[in-house]
Amino acid sequence: MGRGKIAIRRIDNTTSRQVTFSKRRNGLLKKAKELAILCDAEVGLVIFSSTGKLYEFASTSMKAIMEGYNKTKEQSQQLQDSASELKFWQREATNLRKELHTLQQNHRQLMGEELYGLSVKDLQNLENKLDMSLKGIRTKKEQILINEIEELTRKGSIMHQENLELYKKVKLIQQENSELYRKAYGTRDPDAAAVTKNTTPTPSDFTFCGDSLSPIDLQLSQPEPPQNFDVMSRASDSG
């Protein structure tokens, strides 16, 4: 009469469970040792009982075995990640190629090409897209023109203000020149003053001595004698 099959499930009886654990643990440790010797393999076995007690076996060194396990596991994980990443980018490339093809087809249709196979509704949708695009382009163009006009207006206002400032400075200089002219020529002979009435003195007619805070030395030019001075002198002498 053969042995009956044992159901693989948790043993409820504590004593039976402990006896089974001890027997199978010893058998497992024995099999691990035989595997290491017969096949020249590095074998590491770690067992924790239900009470938390540790049982272990290592054919060489448990530390070396664990380090080799972690290194191999990490390399395997990297290979899996690389394969997964490669598949991901392959899917992305496929999706991008499809999207590019769709965009190129839409562009050609917007340019009036490859319209065969389109229904009236599709053509109406295409026409509506073109109208919306034109409206957007016109709006953008008008906004750019408005911005340029505003910028030119602002620059024109600045230039106008600068011109006003320059005009004020010129008027002030003219007033100063007129005041200096009045002080310099105000007591001269009326006939001589009439001759030079329309002559405006320039800064070169005055000589500034010393620094800007020192008194101004005005060097006045002597009035030229009238052209008939010699004739009048001879006539008075002969008389």
Image: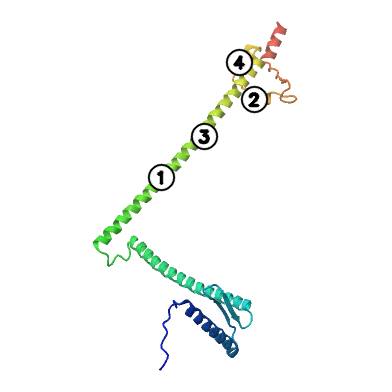
Seen in the picture, residue 123 relative to 67 is either above or below; the reply is above
Residue type indicated by callout 2: Thr
In the image, taking residue 109 as reference, residue 93 lies left or right, namely: right
Q: Identify the element where label 1 is drawn.
A: helix
Residue at 63%, 78% (x, y): give it: 64
Residue at 27%, 65% (x, y): give it: 118
Measure the alpha-carbon separation of dots 2 and 4.
18 Å
Q: Identify the element where label 2 is drawn.
A: loop
User: In the image, residue 22 lies at what x, y percent?
Assistant: 53, 81
Local crowd size for mark 2, using a 10 Å CA cut-off: few (<14), some (14–19), many (≥20): few
User: In the image, residue 125 lies at what x, y percent?
Assistant: 28, 58
The numbered dot on residue 202 is 2
| Circle 3/circle 4 CB separation < 8 Å | no
Location of residue 45 (image quadrant) = bottom right
The numbered dot on residue 33 is none
Measure the alpha-carbon separation of dots 3 and 2.
30 Å
Give the residue pinned by disc 3: 158
**Nearer the observer, disc 3 or disc 2?**
3
Give the residue pinned by disc 1: 143
Compare residues 41 and 3 and report the one nearer the observer.
3
Colour scheme in the image?
rainbow
Q: Identify the element where label 3 is drawn.
A: helix
